[in-house]
Image (cartoon, rainbow, N blue to C red):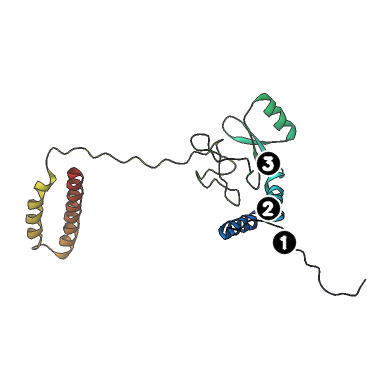
Amino acid sequence: MSGDASTITTAPPPTASDAVREMQAAGRAGHAVPADQVNRWATTLMCLFGQQRSVRLEQWGGSFWYQIDDKQWYRALAAGERVRALYTQPLLHELRRAGEDRDHIWSADRTHCTVCNDPFDWADPYCNPPKPPAPIALKPQPFNPSWVLPLLDRLERALKREGKRERDEWGFRIAQLRKSIDEHTKEKSH
């Protein structure tokens, strides 16, 4: 014992974001990067991503995923059945596929997919994000809606004799009709 009362401090474990941030800074600088620095980055990324064990192994049961152990995993792989391994970090070789067979992208707390919002326990085998609603096609009108505008003007003049509440209510409805007519005539002209 040397009698030194200083505390022993250890550096925090390296993270993937630190390594990527350093890579980006080196790229922006535009200078050559020393080989030992590149080796440190590669070691950090391989330690975090390359050698991790799966957190959970699952097999597709026809309508849901259920947890299996290592023996069942290898047996299912040999039989060609659908299985998946879930990790805390995405694997380096995992590619996000576009189209029908896209992998889920899990939230940080692994409760749901950030793309399709499927819950972690009941997720389908592939990510199916909701499709945007199809626009409703406007049916061609048998008459020109702008023909109604003079009638709306006459109705507005007649409303001046009514009470404030009725004027406000019918004024709002007339404004909505005018807006709808304007939108329809703009679409026709394009």
Q: Position of residue 154 (x, y in %)?
A: 6, 55
Helix, strand or loop for disc 3: strand
> Of the residues under marks 1 and 2, which one precedes in the sequence?
1
Helix, strand or loop for disc 2: helix
The residue drawn where x is 81% and y is 68% is 8
Q: Which residue is mark 2?
A: 38
The mark lying in front, picked from 1 and 3, is 1
Asked whether, in this view, residue 113 is left or right of residue 69, the answer is left
**Nearest to the observer: residue 137 or residue 173:** 137
Q: Residues within 10 Å of mark 3 (few under 14, many from 20)?
A: some
Distance from Cα at disc 1 to Cα at disc 3 = 27 Å
Distance from Cα at disc 2 to Cα at disc 3 = 32 Å
Asked whether, in this view, residue 175 is left or right of residue 158, the answer is right
Which of the labelled discs sits on residue 12, or is there none?
1
Which of the labelled discs sits on residue 56, or is there none?
3
The mark lying in front, picked from 1 and 2, is 2
